[in-house]
Image: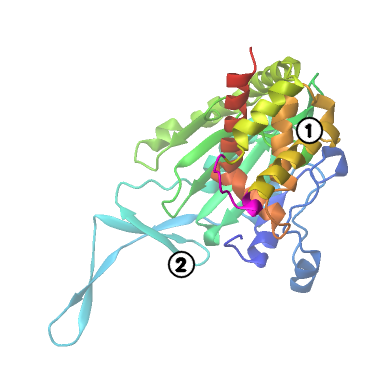
C-alpha cells in the first residue's frame, strides 16, 4: 500500500501520456470524484506534461535554510534556546512548519526547479524529449520527474518500449540527486530493466558543498536515453532469436519451480507446485501476451513476467503491488533469475 494519501496521489502526482495510443492509461490511483469534490485540477495529461504546469502545480516553492536551536535548561525550571551554528534545518518556503530534516552546515540544497527542471529545460525544448511524470512525496520532502521519448520505439521483435530518464532528489536526506535510465515495456506494462545487467545506467550527486559544480551531469545523463534505447533493442532482438525447445522450456520450469523431492510431502504443497507449473505452461503456449514469442528466450522471459504481473498472489491491490515490486527491484530480480536459467540450460 502507498504511504501517501489519496489527496497527495491525486494532487501532487502528474501523469502524462495517458492517451490510449501510448498503451499506458491512467494511474492506478486515479480518483476523478475526489478531485472534483475538492476542486482540484485533473492530474492526468493525454500527452507530455508542460514544463510550466510542473512549475505551477508542484515546484512553486523553495526549500529554505533555517537555524537549528538547542533547548538548554536554566536550572530554575525554565529553558532557553541556543543556536547551533554547525547545523541547519530545511523547511518549505510556503509553510515553514514543514521541517524536512536537520543537517550539518555543509549540506547543499538541490532546488527541484533547478536540478529536476531548469537544467534540462533547454534540452527538452531543443530535442525530442518531454516530461512523462512528475510528483512530490512526503510533503515535498522528495520529488521526481521522468523525461522520455514522446514516441514509442517499435522493435523488430514486436515489443514496444518507452525508455525514460528518472530524475529525483530530496530535501529530507533520503535521496541523493539521482539520474537513472529505466525502460518500460508497453506490452503488459512489464519491465525488462534487469535484462541488460545488474543495474541500468545511473548517476548520483550528493548534497555536498561541491555538488553545484556537477550540475552538467544532467546533460550528460540525458544523452544516454537514446544510447540505452539502442542497447535494449539489441538485447530484445537477441532474446527473440534464441531458440528454446519444449524440452528446454520444461527444464527451465523445473529449475525455477522445482518439484518437491520430499518423500512425505503434503498433497497441498505438491498440488500448489503442479498448479503453478501448469499455469506457466499455459501462459507460455496460449496467452496472446506471450505466445508470439513462444519457442524463444524472449517468450520464456515474457511468460514469467506475465505470470508475476497478472496471476501471482491475489487480485487485491495487484496494480499497486506490481508497481511496488518494480520500485523495490523484485521484478528485476525475477528477470535475472529467468535469464540465468536460460543461460545455463539453453546453448548460446
| Main SS, magenta residues | loop
Q: In the visual, does 68 lie left or right of 36?
A: left
Q: In the visual, does 140 lie left or right of 21?
A: left
Instruction: Classify residue 23 by image quadrant.
Output: top right
Viewer-proximal residue, 131 or 281?
Answer: 281
Q: In the visual, does 124 lie left or right of 110?
A: right
Report the Cα–Cα distance between label 1 and label 2.
Answer: 55 Å
Q: Which residue is mark 2?
A: 96
Residue in the image at 86% along x and 35% along y: 288
Q: Secondary structure at mark 2?
A: loop
Residue in the image at 47% along x and 66% along y: 98
Residue 284's label in the rendered image is 1
Q: Position of residue 238 (x, y in %)?
A: 70, 16
Which residue is at the far front? Answer: 263
Residue in the image at 54% along x and 47% along y: 112
Which contiguous range is marked in magenta? 261-269
Q: Position of residue 223 (x, y in %)?
A: 60, 23
Instruction: Classify residue 166 by image quadrant.
Output: top right
Can residue 340 be seen here?
yes
Looking at the rendered image, the quarter that the N terminus falls into is bottom right
Instruction: Check if residue 264 falls in the magenta segment.
Output: yes
Instruction: Classify residue 40 by image quadrant.
Output: bottom right
Q: Position of residue 96 (x, y in %)?
A: 46, 67
Q: Position of residue 131 (x, y in %)?
A: 69, 40
Q: Which is in the foreground here, disc 1 or disc 2? A: 1
Crowding at mark 2 (Cα within 10 Å: few <14, some 14-19, many 20+): few
Q: Secondary structure at mark 1?
A: helix
Amino acid at each position: 500500500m502507498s504511504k501517501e494519501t489519496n489527496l497527495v496521489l491525486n494532487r501532487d502526482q502528474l501523469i502524462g501520456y495517458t492517451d490510449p495510443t501510448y498503451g499506458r492509461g491512467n494511474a492506478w490511483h486515479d480518483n476523478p470524484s475526489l478531485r472534483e469534490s475538492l476542486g482540484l485540477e485533473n492530474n492526468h495529461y493525454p500527452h507530455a506534461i508542460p514544463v510550466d504546469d510542473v512549475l505551477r502545480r508542484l515546484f512553486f516553492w523553495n526549500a529554505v535554510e533555517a537555524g537549528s536551536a538547542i533547548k538548554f535548561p536554566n536550572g530554575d525550571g525554565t529553558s532557553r534556546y541556543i543556536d547551533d551554528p554547525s547545523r541547519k534545518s530545511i523547511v518549505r518556503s510556503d509553510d515553514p512548519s514543514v521541517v524536512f530534516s536537520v543537517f550539518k552546515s555543509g549540506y547543499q540544497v538541490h532546488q527541484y526547479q533547478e536540478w529536476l527542471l531548469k537544467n534540462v529545460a533547454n534540452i527538452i525544448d531543443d530535442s525530442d524529449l518531454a516530461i512523462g511524470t512528475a510528483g512530490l512525496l512526503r510533503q515535498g520532502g522528495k520529488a521526481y520527474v521522468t523525461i522520455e521519448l514522446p514516441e514509442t520505439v517499435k522493435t523488430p521483435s514486436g515489443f514496444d518500449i518507452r525508455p525514460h530518464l528518472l530524475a529525483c532528489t530530496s530535501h529530507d536526506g533520503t535521496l541523493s540527486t539521482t539520474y537513472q535510465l529505466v525502460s518500460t515495456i508497453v506490452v503488459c506494462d512489464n519491465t525488462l530493466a534487469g535484462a541488460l545487467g545488474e543495474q541500468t545506467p545511473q548517476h548520483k550527486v550528493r548534497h555536498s558543498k561541491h555538488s553545484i559544480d556537477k550540475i552538467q551531469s544532467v546533460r550528460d545523463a540525458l544523452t544516454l536515453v537514446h544510447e540505452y534505447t539502442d542497447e535494449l533493442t539489441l538485447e530484445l532482438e537477441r532474446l527473440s532469436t534464441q531458440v528454446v525447445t519444449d524440452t528446454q522450456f520444461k527444464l527451465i520450469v523445473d529449475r525455477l519451480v522445482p518439484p518437491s523431492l520430499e518423500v512425505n510431502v503434503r498433497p497441498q504443497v505438491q498440488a500448489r507446485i503442479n498448479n503453478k507449473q501448469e499455469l506457466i505452461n499455459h501462459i507460455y503456449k496460449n496467452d496472446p501476451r506471450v505466445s508470439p514469442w513462444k519457442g524463444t528466450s524472449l517468450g520464456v522471459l515474457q511468460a514469467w513476467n506475465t505470470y508475476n504481473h497478472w496471476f501471482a498472489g491475489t487480485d487485491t491491490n495487484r496494480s499497486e503491488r506490481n508497481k511496488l515490486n518494480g520500485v523495490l527491484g523484485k521484478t528485476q530480480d525475477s528477470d535475472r533469475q529467468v535469464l540465468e536459467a536460460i543461460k545455463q540450460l539453453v546453448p548460446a
